[in-house]
Image (spheres, rainbow, N blue to C red):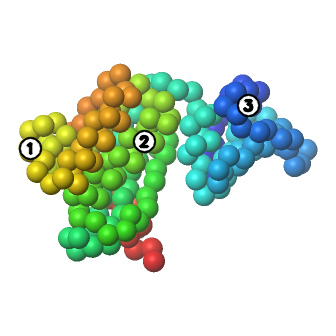
Amino acid sequence: MPVIECDVDDARKRLEDAGVTVDSGHTDHERWRASHGDATAVAYDDKVVIQGQNPRDLEALLREGGGRAHVYFDGAARGNPGPAAIGWVIVTGNGIVAEGSERIGRATNNQAEYEALIAALEAARDYGYDELHVRGDSELIVKQVHGEYNTNNPTLREKRVTVHELLRAFDEWTLEHVPRDVNEHADELANKALDRS
């Protein structure tokens, strides 16, 4: 449940400017409430708490845009192809800003890695970061995106194009291969999503 410490009047204006309907609070302590998609933002005196299944869209509208973030991504498949899932984490100097995981159906491990990278980049774009430092433990994906390895598989080639389109949203970006233990949280998220039935 994301908690955003902010000027709640400014936060309300930001939501209204984005076309989100803001209603009165339900209790004396609530300043206002706003629902968008599967999430609800509840404002108190100096913070907004976001509840619901998918808080990302509301949270992206409420957080200040810009700045630098570190992104970690991982995909997992049981069988190749087989049931697959993704995990990603966005981290700033303030800690974990957002994370996500989900099952993506049947895929190869490399397809899952690309899907995880795409989901992470979409989230970072929605949060409005200017500078992104992306890390993953798939050397193949990192080297394909950098153009060091050929991408002969048509499905992976299409995903690589999508990654490059998303990277254009950032003023600066880096993408580097890291050992699995550095990418542990994203790996755990992907595997937990796979374990869910």
Q: Position of residue 69 (x, y in %)?
A: 40, 33
> Real-space Cα distance between discs 2 and 1?
24 Å
Q: Under tag 2, what secondary structure?
A: helix
Which residue is the extreme one toward the right?
Answer: 28
Q: Position of residue 96 (x, y in %)?
A: 47, 44
Question: Which residue is drawn at the image coordinates 23% and 65% (left, top)?
Answer: 108
Q: Amino acid at mark 2?
A: Glu
Which is nearer the eye, 108 or 6? 108
Question: Which residue is drawn at the image coordinates 75% and 43% (left, top)?
Answer: 34
Residue assigned mark 3:
16
Location of residue 17 (image quadrant):
top right
Q: Amino acid at mark 1?
A: Tyr
Q: Is residue 175 above or below residue 14?
A: below
> Real-space Cα distance between discs 1 and 3?
46 Å
Image quarter hosting the C terminus: bottom left
Which is nearer the eye, 188 or 141? 141
Q: Circle 1: is it few (<14), some (14-19), or many (20+) Cα within 10 Å? A: few
Which is more N-terminal, label 1 or label 2?
2
Question: Which residue is drawn at the image coordinates 85% and 44% (left, top)?
Answer: 25
Judge from the rendering whether residue 173 lies leftward or rightward of residue 33; answer left or right.
left
Q: Position of residue 116 (x, y in %)?
A: 34, 52
> Mark on residue 77?
none
Q: Is residue 161 above or below residue 112?
A: above
Which is nearer the eye, 26 or 77? 77
> Real-space Cα distance between discs 3 and 2?
23 Å
Residue assigned mark 1:
149
Question: Which residue is drawn at the image coordinates 56% and 37% (left, top)?
Answer: 60
Q: Circle 2: is it few (<14), some (14-19), or many (20+) Cα within 10 Å? A: some
Location of residue 143 (image quadrant):
top left
Q: Amino acid at mark 3?
A: Glu
Tag 1–tag 3 contact (CB < 8 Å): no
Q: Under tag 1, what secondary structure?
A: loop
